[in-house]
Amino acid sequence: MIDSQSLVAYLPRFSEVRLLCVGDLMLDRFVAGEVSRISPEAPIPIFQVGRETAMLGGAGNVVRNATALGASACFVAVVGDDPVGHELTAMVGNEPRVEPYLLVERDRLSTIKTRYIAGAQQLLRADNETLRPITSDTADNIVRVASEVVASCDAVVISDYAKGVLTAPVISAVIEAARAAGKPIVVDPKGGDFGRYKGATVLTPNRREAMAATGTATGVKGTDEDAMAAMGTALTERFDVDAAVITRSESGMSLVTRDGVAEHLPAQAREVFDVSGAGDTVAAMLAMALGCGADLPAAVQLANHAAGVVVGKVGTSVVYCDDLLRAIHAGQWSAAEAKVMSLAGAAERVEQWRRGGD
């Protein structure tokens, strides 16, 4: 394990990192309210709508996490020519450290996920989206843009939510361009076919995704860590990647490298409120850390701390440097020091209180 001072030393370097993020952009809308009775029409709660907020989700949340820590990003994504697409375009355009390359498909429905929350509890999520593959012209434009900007970036994130944007040819071409430019490639995968990610630096599946990709049965023998090591080794060997970082929810995460070395990190969260977007945070942090010169063990430790922070927040949230400092120094700072936070972090805290009705 890397000591806390060595980890903290990477934080100021994040502002020098420039990421290329390619993936599925979506709108995360949160409807906060309260439930005080059951409907007389059916055994369902009556949700009294209160406050609504919206933020960038999916690959957009990867970019938000990167810029919250001071990095800049080239963002390549696809939206539809519809109200949600227009809202997403405006939101990305308002991000000061993001260089957007949003491609528009006229007949495509932009993705929106609406979450209904009472207090700190999600009651329902409603999705409206398109899952069909993008057109060949759009795919060609994604590859062209990514190939043109990758040399000016320090690391690449491929954020796959299986919404039809990241087709196998697009993923392969982006990975090929990044490898030719000598850039580390972090992939947040989706589905069971990981062959399309061949050649990436790091895959970041959760436990369920890793099991599906490797064909691992639920009743594996040995400890959970043994199972993670075996699955991680299978992922690196089958799909020609340097390492796999398997996220294990409340059990932490496991790093397994191509040479079979496994490192298991316990979860850092003190209390879990919402896992929405935690995978985005992990992918963004890994890419940023690798982009500023950290080795994989250090990058994974930083990602583990970041994930521990974000699951303690309600909704699709981001991690700020002061959040990360407190997480790394947990138990070492005084109570007064732990209360100090940046303006952005304080603003987010207030927004979370409002969303939860506090």
Image (tube, grey):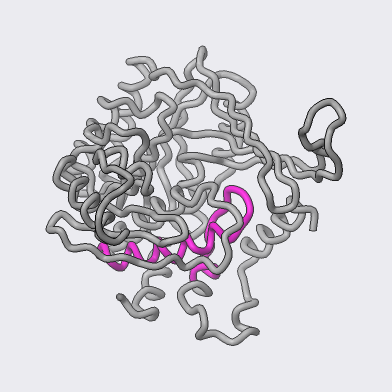
Question: Residue 67 at what x, y percent from top left?
Answer: 49, 53
Quadrant for the N terminus, please. bottom left
Q: Nearer the viewer, residue 190 or 158?
A: 190
Q: Is residue 19 above or below residue 223?
A: above
Q: At 44% across and 33% down in the image, what residue appears? A: 24
Query: Could one spot residue 156 in this view of the protein?
Result: no
Question: Residue 296 at what x, y percent from top left?
Answer: 26, 62
User: Left or right: 29 with respect to 172?
Assistant: right
In the orientation shown, which residue stands out farthest toward the top? 107
Q: Which residues are magenta?
A: 296-324
Q: Nearer the viewer, residue 247 or 13?
A: 247
Query: Could one spot residue 124 in this view of the protein?
Result: yes
Q: At 44% across and 49% down in the image, what residue appears? A: 279
Residue 299 lies in magenta, yes or no?
yes
Instruction: Tell me which secondary structure the magenta stretch mostly adopts.
Output: helix
Q: Nearer the viewer, residue 168 or 221?
A: 221
Q: Is residue 210 above or below residue 44?
A: below
Question: Residue 241 at what x, y percent from top left?
Answer: 19, 46
User: Left or right: 55 with respect to 206?
Assistant: right
Quadrant for the C terminus, please. bottom right
Q: Nearer the viewer, residue 257 or 72?
A: 257
Question: Residue 294 at what x, y percent from top left?
Answer: 28, 65
Residue 283 lies in magenta, yes or no?
no
User: Left or right: 333 with respect to 292?
Assistant: right
Q: At 83% across and 37% down in the image, what residue appears? A: 38
Q: Is residue 248 above or below residue 25?
A: below
